[in-house]
Amino acid sequence: MFTVGLTGGIGSGKSAAAARFRHHGVKVVDADQAARIVVEPGQPALAAITEHFGKSVILPQGGLDRAALRKLVFDNPAERRWLEQLTHPLIREEIIASLTASAETHPAPYAILESPLLLETSQSELVQRICVVDIPEDVQLTRASARDANSVDQIRKIMAAQMPRAERCARADDILDNSGLLESLYAQVDALHQQYLQLAVHPQ
Ligand code: ADP
C-alpha cells in the first residue's frame, strides 16, 4: 500500500496531523505504539532489557518503566546503542506487520506511518513519501512543555538530541507548517490528502 511517513520533532504536531488523516479514513500506523508493543510483558525484548539493566526498570505490575529506562540511556551513548540495536529491528517488524494487517482488514486508500524516528532509522525505507510537521523551535518548546510533565530544560535537551529542524525539512517531500492554529494545520492536511489519494493511484 502507498505509505507516507509522517514525522517531526517533539511537540511539532505529529499526533494532531495524524488524527486529521485518520478522520479522512486513512490508516495510521503509530511507531510509538509499535515501540510499546515490542517491550510488553512476555516479549523477549523485555527479558533482555531486564537482564541488561536490572529490575530497576520494571514497574511493580511487571511492565517496563519507560521513564526509568529513558533516564538510564539518555546521557549514555553506549547503553542507548545497545537498546536501539535490540529494539529497532523489532519495532520495524511490528510496523511492517501492522501495515500488512491493515491492508488486509481495513481497506484504506493509503497508509500513514507516524514516527518520531522515521528519518533516523531504516523506517524511512518503508515509506514512499516523507511529510514533515514543522514549527519554530520556540513554539515547539512551549507546546511540548505545556503537554508533557517535562520541564522546559528537559524538552530543550530532547530537542537537542533530535535531528536539527533544517536537516529534517531538507528531507521532506511535503511540509506541514503547524506554527498557526489547528484549523490551518487541518486545511493543509486536507489538501495533502487529496494529493496522496492521487499518488496512491498513480505513483510518480
Ligand atoms: P507530537 O505528536 O509531534 O509530539 P502533538 O500533536 O502531541 O505533537 O502536539 C503537541 C501539543 O501541541 C499537544 O498538546 C497539541 O494539542 C498541541 N498542538 C498541536 N498543534 C497545535 C496548534 N496548531 N495550535 C495549538 N496547539 C497545538
Image (cartoon, rainbow, N blue to C red):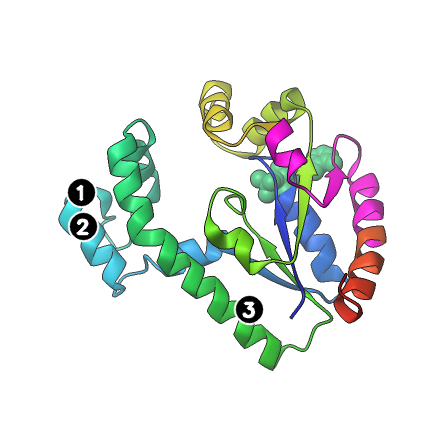
Q: Nearer the viewer, residue 182 or 113?
A: 113
- Count of all numbered marks drawn on residues in the image: 3
Q: Position of residue 171 (x, y in %)?
A: 64, 40
Q: Is residue 65 visible?
A: no
Q: Amino acid at mark 1?
A: Phe
Q: Amino acid at mark 2?
A: Thr
Q: Nearer the viewer, residue 15 or 165?
A: 165
The kind of secondary structure element at disc 2 is helix
Q: Please give the name of the residue rendered at 83% of the width and 53% of the height, measured from the top-left corner.
A: 190
Residues tagged 2 and 3 counted as in contact (Cβ below 8 A) = no
The residue that label 3 is drawn on is: 99
Q: Nearer the viewer, mark 2 or mark 3?
A: 3
Q: Please give the name of the residue rendered at 50% of the width and 53% of the height, measured from the top-left corner.
A: 123
Q: Is residue 77 visible?
A: yes
The residue that label 1 is drawn on is: 53
Q: Give the residues drawn in magenta, as a range.
A: 166-190
